[in-house]
Amino acid sequence: MNRIYRWTYFLAIVLLPFRGISQDNTPKYSNEFLSIGVGARSLGMSNAQVSVTDNVTAGYWNPAGLLDIKSDYQFELMHASLFAGIANFDYAGFATPIDSSSHLGFSIVRFAVDDIPDTRFLYDANGVLNYQNINFFSAADYAFIFSFARRVNFIPGLKLGANFKVIHRTVGDFAKAWGFGLDAGAQLTLNRWRLGLMLRDITGTFNSWSHNQELVRDIYNQTGNEIPDNTLEITLPKLILGISRNWDLSRNFALLAALDLDISFDGKRNVPISSDVMSIDPHAGMELSYKRVVYIRGGVGNIQQIKDFDGSKSTTVQANFGLGFSIKQVQVDYALTDMGDQSDALYSHVFSIRASIDKK
């Protein structure tokens, strides 16, 4: 009971900064490419990872989980082709211990739509259609995440972690942005139960946009569009709470179940629990393992309240499925995930590979 009381007190302290957050001049869904999730294991479990994550992907999900890595070095690579191949989503992560109580991690996330045609000069000066004048560019979002995790002694079983994020977003030569932000995470182990807390963008993540107005001025004036100005975009904090438990079903089989609650503070969203102050988006996942070698995963999330054109409402649920195989110090994971639950074309196949290396 003392450990639970201390954990509750800790939550109260870290939640105090959210009281004074203003929703004025802050857009919804800022930096949403960082809400997709990384690692096929995670996506197969519908991103219910805040209390579960225990490998190199913890640098993204909850840096406190880096402390569960047993090897000297751990790497992971992931690639996903989303929205019927329109967009590419890639991730690379690395983690290593500093000492018995501290770990470091580094992650790179890239979400991009490549080979977008630039048709501004499709017609030449003589008014002749010339396809040779078409150039191509990419709209890409990058995140560079530096992670640190450390065990603490004032609460037994408590691990803390923090991220420093650098965001870079580009739209060809037309616009670019740089942003910076901080995350904080914690995990607490209570026998077979694990609790997780992740505070994303705890100070607000600031993206400073600069636009090359000269490239679009003539076209925008001709089409009546507003020429964009340099702006500052702020990503409001998000709180994620997680709980999970592991059961040993037999000598060879084990079951892991996890539930996460994503709590956002940017006004009403189309999620099961929403208000003018906050919205709560639940998602859950399970993992059945055989001898810690073969894994079968599933999960549900992205529960959305959709309003149709006739005024009626319907609920959509995103279901995910995954498989994993562990061979010595290499793990290969696969996930089949429905990114939007609207069309078969939105089903995506995600693959990731993780390798653990020891100095000896």
Image: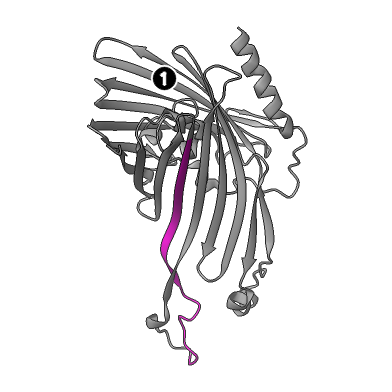
Q: Position of residue 279 (x, y in %)?
A: 63, 32
Q: Is residue 9 left or right of residue 176?
A: right
Q: Position of residue 51 (x, y in %)?
A: 49, 25
Q: Position of residue 25 (x, y in %)?
A: 74, 50
Is residue 317 in view?
A: no
Quadrant of the drawing holding the C terminus: top left
Q: Which of these two is toward me, 111 or 358? A: 358
Is residue 11 in view?
A: yes
Q: Position of residue 321 (x, y in %)?
A: 33, 31
Q: Which of these two is toward me, 95 or 238? A: 95
- Was residue 62 drawn as part of the magenta stretch in this picture? no
What residue is shown with label 1? Answer: 257
Q: Is residue 50 left or right of residue 199?
A: left
Q: Taking 327 as reference, is 22 above or below it?
A: below
User: Magenta segment range?
Assistant: 103-126
At a point 33% along the width and 27% down the height, the residue shown is 297
At a point 69% along the width and 28% down the height, the residue shown is 15
Given the image, on which type of amino acid does mark 1 rest? Ala
Quadrant of the drawing holding the N terminus: top right
